Amino acid sequence: MKKILMIFAVLAVAFLAVAASGCLGSDDKESDKNITAAPAQSVIIYTDGDNVIAQMTVMIMGTHSQSIDKDNVTVNINGTNVDVFVPAVTTSDVNTRDIGYENVTVILGKTKDFKEGTAYTVTVGGKTDAMNKYGFEIVDGTLYSFRAANIDSVTVAADGNNITATAVIAIGGGSNSVDKENITAATGYNTDNEFDIYIPLKIRDGPSTMEMKWGEEKFTIGQLNTMKDGTYTVNVNGYTVLFTIESGKLTIND
């Protein structure tokens, strides 16, 4: 009988040890959450008078395994660079691979702390490419924000010897305009045979009319008599058009 009781006692101790080990493993896993920067889908910058605020829609990968830790969003200002980190926390190895979106509002800083007439660049999650480039400037007490314009269409054509790209821009309401001073257009194609054009939108903070405005920008991107035969890409704010040059003739790719 004593042997039986001793066996039960040993089994009980072993069970408790395994259970404790499992609990510790669970705690370790909990403390080892995977934290990454959530990419921004859109950023709207405005002021409430006292503060400059960014209203963001950020993306999460796997709505059942990832969430946004809104309590630990950080803002770091270094000169004219404003870096925002929105932590996406992965709490499960199970990923349904679906894409979800969450809205996050963060104060970038006090309005009075940003210098008048100085352009500030806002990056979210360290992304600095043109499509993730945001910014703002305060002029005479009014805040103007900047972001990539929405492109409705791009037409590539031959105009005599010139090759032109014409972009139709969805400008939006009455307070929006194309920031012509900061348009960047490559003077030639890169190693991937791509012409990169960036068109920013300038948005005045405050009430705006609701009508939809459109704009158009035309660029000369090359000359037929100097372009080598091949396929080329025109990229305007992520909107792409492919065309082919062959024996001095231009053809648009479907």
Image: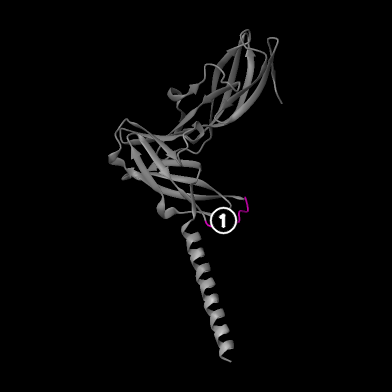
Could you say where residue 239 lies in the image, as x and y percent from the top left?
59, 30
Looking at the image, which residue is at 56% across and 56% down?
65
* Left/right of residue 61 with respect to residue 138 in the rendered view: right
Residue drawn at x 57%, y 83% as measured from the top left: 7
Farthest residue, direction left: 112
Report the magenta stretch's main SS.
loop
User: In the displayed structure, does residue 26 sit left or right of residue 119?
Assistant: right
Badge 1: residue crowd in 10 Å (few <14, some 14–19, many ≥20)? some
Kindly give the residue lying farthest to the bottom in the view shown. 1
Residue 178 vs 250, above or below: the answer is: below
Highlighted magenta segment, given as a residue range:
91-97
Q: Is 177 in the magenta?
A: no
Frontmost residue, 102 versus 30: 30
Residue 28: x and y in percent read 48, 61
The quadrant where residue 81 appears: top left
SS at mark 1 in the image: loop
Q: Quadrant of the C terminus?
A: top right
> In terms of depth relative to the viewer, which is nearer, 13 or 133?
13
| Quadrant, the N terminus | bottom right
Of 150 and 4, nearer the camera is 4
Left or right, 74 with reference to 94 = left
Instruction: Please indicate whether residue 76 sits to the left or right of residue 42 in the image.
Output: left
Image coordinates of residue 73 in percent, x first then y, are: 41, 49
Q: Which amino acid does the dot numbered 1 rest on?
A: Ser
Residue at 51% in and 68% down: 21
Residue at the image point whose x is 41% and y is 43% from the top: 84
Residue marked by disc 1: 65
x, y percent for residue 67 = 51, 54
Q: Quadrant of residue 224?
A: top right
